[in-house]
Image (cartoon, grey):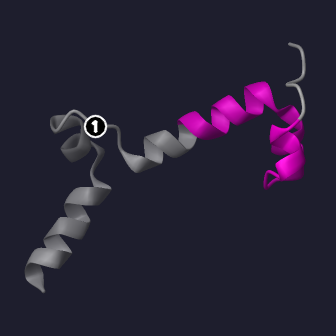
Amino acid sequence: MRDQHQLHQLRQNPTEWHRRGMTAPAEIDVLVANRLQENYPTIAAAGEPSYADFFTAPAAA
């Protein structure tokens, strides 16, 4: 059990992800949210994306 707890703590630490050449999940969430907001501004206003958000042309910047 102690090893699982320690593993959980390591997974929460972005430095441990970076040490292994990966991006932390929280950082990926931010990247995705920013990209969605840039390309599909209606998603940011509506909250959760819908299928229609991905099957229409992105709004011009």
Given residues 33 and 59, the one toward you in this image is 59
Asked if 2 appears above or below 12 in the picture, the reply is below
| The C terminus sits in image quarter | top right
Percent position of residue 39, x then y: 77, 26
- At x 16%, y 37%, the residue is 19
Secondary structure of residue under mark 1: loop
Percent position of residue 53, x then y: 85, 42
Q: Is residue 43 magenta?
A: yes
Percent position of residue 26, x then y: 45, 48
Instruction: State the image quarter where residue 57 is shown.
Output: top right
Give the class, few, some or many, for how many residues have Cα within 10 Å of label 1's Cα (few <14, many ≥20): few
- Residue 27 is left or right of residue 56, and the answer is left
Given residues 6 and 58, the one toward you in this image is 58
- At x 85%, y 25%, the residue is 58
| The N terminus sits in image quarter | bottom left
- Please, which residue is most extreme toward the top here? 61
- Please, which residue is most extreme toward the bottom here? 1
- Residue 1 is left or right of residue 32, and the answer is left
Percent position of residue 35, x then y: 66, 30
Q: Is residue 49 magenta?
A: yes
Instruction: State the image quarter where residue 17 is shown.
Output: top left
- Residue 11 is left or right of residue 34, and the answer is left
Give amino acid for label 1: Met
- At x 36%, y 44%, the residue is 24
- Residue 18 is left or right of residue 50, and the answer is left
Please name the residue that numbered disc 1 is placed on: 22
Labels in figure, total: 1
Asked if 58 appears above or below 7 in the picture, the reply is above
Asked if 60 appears above or below 9 in the picture, the reply is above
Q: Report the span colored magenta.
A: 31-55
The prevailing secondary structure element of the residues shown in magenta is: helix
- Please, which residue is most extreme toward the left here? 3
